[in-house]
Amino acid sequence: MDYSIKIEDVLRYKNPNPIKFNITARDGWQSNHGALVPVQDMIRAYENSSSYGVNSFQTAGGTFWDLPVKKGRDPFEFNQEHCAFYAKAGVEQRALIRGECGFSYGRQSYDVLKAVIGVHIDAGVTVFQNFNATNTVEMMRGVPLAVRELCEEKDIDNVRVLGGITIQQNPDSLERQEEILAEYKAFAQALMNTGHEGFYLKSANGIFSDASLFADVVRMLKRKFPDQTVDVHMHNTYYHSPAIYLAAIKAGADGVDVLPDHLAEGTAQMGLGALLHYMEHSEDPEIIARMPQGLNMEAIEQDRAAQLGVRGQYSSTEMPFNPEDLRFAEEAGSAGGAVVALKGVKDLIPNLKVVLKTDDWNVMRNAVYKQKRINRAALGYPTNVTPLELMQDVQAAQDVISIKNGKKEFDVMRPETVEYLSGQLGNVSVTADKDLQKRALEMARQTTNDDYMETQFTTALERLEESDIALVEPIILQKIENLPPALPVAAKALVDAGIESPTEEQILIAACSGHDGVKFVTGQTKPIKAPVLPRDLQMDGVLHDIAPILYDVAFTARELTRVRWMLENRNTVKGTAEWIEILQNKINVEAFKLVKHLTEANASQSVVLKARRAIKILATDLGADNGVIPIIDADMFSKGIVKLTMSSNSSTDRHVNQY
């Protein structure tokens, strides 16, 4: 699709502040593919990124330290090779960091946090998108502190830290809208006071049926802090992003996170081309006037085949579109990338298989999400983002097992739940169940070996007795600088494991990833293998050359199915019907290209059947309706007449017939 002419048409508005597009390369791989894609393939998919004309690329962060370790990949090589590619491309690199948890799941000591941030600065990261799931500044202040010290030590001044604000719509959000706005306003000021520059609104689950709250937060930030930028991040798992992004752009957001269309959607961010389309069709001059400038759609298109090739190979990790499954996930508030990550939680599947008496992952996942929905109110609707998303998932899975064994939810309280309710990860929701919090504090006090923490838990229990509700701040967190250094502890663990003289890199791996890090360094972790493509799609297979077309048709069919369903069942934005037409036309065009290629290659009937079968299998696995999957008539093809059977409402030409 060529948007250059359309962009020129709207430049007459001459708005001095066009919206900026930020590519979430790292999050795209993580959300749809569980960070399983090797770095070489990640780079291959963005070969022309230096010419995209976007504002930045998110190249590191999230699970892209700890998860490679678990998969048997060196995080130094993994991150540095990835960042080195973008450094050579000369683009701004960003990394998502989980506050003082760094790139791990629990709070790090300051020596570890500073060291791992330094590694990313050396690799070329200049912007850290800093967030905490509970919006607790005391769990975030160590990041700008470390960056400031590192800049002085390295004599640089080009690194900044965005203040993340995690935001989502819960069942009680609209009733508490004014209260929530006041909370965000105070939190934003605290972020400024601790050295953050600019804001990063992060909605990991992307659930916003009403755009007013999100837009009001953007307006509040722009009015209160006019010199600060506001960037918006949202997953489009449940198709709320178009409305929210348009509202945020109109409200004055400076940048939005997107992906190239060929790597977008699923449980990741919405597509760049899709957002351009919705902006154009908004019929709102304030939105149209902010169309991005300088995009090079031709350069993005040049990476299309490589992006589709990589995505196709790892397609089995993506969540198929299924309205019922999606409903369970949405009611549970599940975050985008976590839908993929849930399957990898240790010991989860074997135990669920036993109690549910099934090998069907969809049945297991839906059982967890049904229970998760029930649990949310008792936990106070904590934000569905790492590590609170993982906490809710494992607690729900535990409760499914407990209930099947005759117990009740929360009878067995997971350590992650104890950690949250006792305030060890930051603030606790004001609506959390008081009795649950009491149990969590008692368990935390019984299991801690730290005198300071024991005193905090004891004091919190005394305060809780005098309160009618759960404590938002049950304990006073120690400043990160006062925590015991952890690098020496990690070094000793490696020596005890048989590494006589561990390197600084090995020590940092062990410090960040704990037992998994020690296993990796000592060679006990086998590298994960790439999925094997069907024989016909492999390098020497008969379908290898046309594989990107096959993938394009299948993924577009899934997206067309999803958007059609959304149009029929949701309040969608203007331009949705037109977007459906574009998707359908894209399938037609790609299918025609496929037929043309097969014809020019004098393909045999068996090859045509293999191509048809490959499209059918992948599109069906992804959740596409049969009616939108093109069918090549192999019998007619063998007679020299090319006939392509398409769904109804398809455009036609001499090679394409309707049902």
Image (cartoon, rainbow, N blue to C red):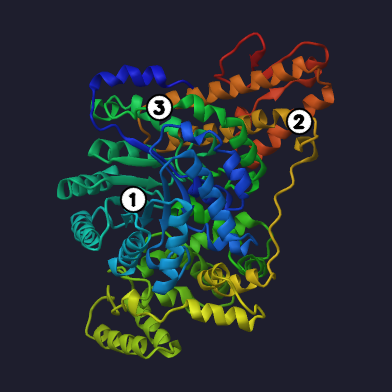
Neighbour tally class for label 1: few under 14, some 14-19, many 20 plus, Cα within 10 Å? few
Q: Which mark is residue 380?
A: none
Compared to residue 15, the image places residue 600 above or below, namely above
Q: In this view of the protein, which residue sits in the foreground, 307 or 31? A: 307
Quick check: can you spot residue 334?
A: no
**Residue at image mark 1:** 158
Q: Residue at 37% across / 80% down in the picture? A: 483
Q: Which mark is residue 277?
A: 3
Instruction: Tell me which label, 3 or 2, sits earlier in the chain.
Output: 3
Neighbour tally class for label 2: few under 14, some 14-19, many 20 plus, Cα within 10 Å? many
Instruction: Tell me which label, 3 or 1, sits earlier in the chain.
Output: 1
Which image quadrant is residue 520 in?
A: bottom right
Residue 121, percent from left and from top: 43, 56
How far apart are the alpha carbons under marks 3 and 2? 33 Å
How far apart are the alpha carbons under marks 3 and 1? 34 Å
What secondary structure is marked by label 3? helix
**Residue at image mark 2:** 543
Compared to residue 81, the image places residue 453 above or below, namely below
Residue type highlighted by circle 1: Asn
